[in-house]
Image (spheres, rainbow, N blue to C red):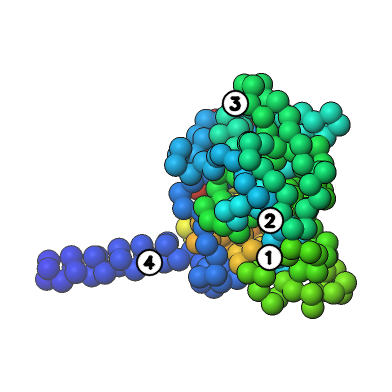
Amino acid sequence: MKKMRRGVFAGSAVAVLMLTAACGSGDNSAGKSDSVQPVGDSKQAGSGYDGYGGGSGAVPAADTVKSGPAGELKVRATTELGNTVTDSAGFTLYRFDKDTPKPPKSNCEGDCAKVWPAVSADDASAGAGIDKSLLGSVERADGTKQLTLDGWPVYRYAKDTKAGDTLGEGVGGTWHVLAPDGKPAKAGNNAGSGAGADPSAGAGAGAGAGAGAGEAGGQEKAQADPIGVNRDTKLGAILTDAEGRTLYRFDKDSAWPMKTNCLDACLNTWKPAKAVDKELVKGIPAELVGTFKRPDGTEQLTIDCWPLYTFTGDKEPGDINGQGNKGVWFAVSDKGKKVTATG
């Protein structure tokens, strides 16, 4: 009899563990988890709100940082961003909105430069589809020469692990893939039709992508980052919604079973985060993303089974005014954990 009881208990424990592991997926999830490729166990960095992506834990492993000359720049046609610029090895090149082109000046130094390595001006040349008169250089604080395109300092992104990756696009709302004219790349910028467009981009990015397709691509891009990761200098890597607003969890809610205790007057201050399509989420493990049906029937975003909210006291993207509010409201890390550091 004792053996049987132990067996029943063990079976029950396994069942509970299986259900707990599944609370952020399956029927409670938005989209398909098998279509998202999370970026390993590294942290999304490079916030435009704190200026660069510094702070504790922001620096990736040295072997992931791309450095060295760009060689001959290439134009790569994509369906999502149109014509983009890469180095000779095919790695995507970026610009930072907080830099200046006239005169050229980089505002990405220190830890920022480890997350966003400056591209050396040495040996850089313009390939087909790029006006060589747009290439230049700017002297950095350490005396090295950084490549510029139409005056904008040029960077790689440490999280791009293979040619063609564009994981840095839109990070913090201030980092953007470069177009051949030095402007931020965007759908509809003559993808596939310009001279020197990379044929390896495939037929989908070819000349058949007309104005209508470009417009549709732009709409798709507008939804491409439903959950962001902001590198806050005090809190580290924390989750944001598509508008850059910090996402919070409430200690009086519960993750298992999923339950909200933010009702009635609470909702005047804390707004439930809208459910998202996990197929469009990048930078965090897809299995963390799920949804919760609130008492009013609306779907709320969950991370690691916890319902998430935005705070009406946050007025600008990147604000963390809700952190630690009344000792029960906390930002959420890119690993889905409660952040207890103070802002």
- Apparent side of residue 259 relative to residue 126 in the rendered image (left or right): left
- Disc 3 secondary structure class: loop
- Which of 174/25 is in front? 174
Image point (61%, 52%), residue name: 88
Mark 3 crowd level (few <14, some 14–19, many ≥20, 10 Å Cα): few
Mark 1 crowd level (few <14, some 14–19, many ≥20, 10 Å Cα): many
Separation of marks 2 and 4 at Cα, in angstroms: 48 Å
Residue 108 locus on image (x, y percent):
67, 31
Tag nearer the camera, 3 or 1 = 1
Residue 110 marker = 3
Separation of marks 2 and 1 at Cα, in angstroms: 8 Å
Name the kind of residue labelled 2 in the image.
Lys
Residue 198 marker = 1
Kindly identify which residue carries mark 4: 18
- Apparent side of residue 211 relative to residue 243 in the rendered image (left or right): right
Tag nearer the camera, 4 or 3 = 3
Asked if 319 appears above or below 164 in the picture, the reply is: above
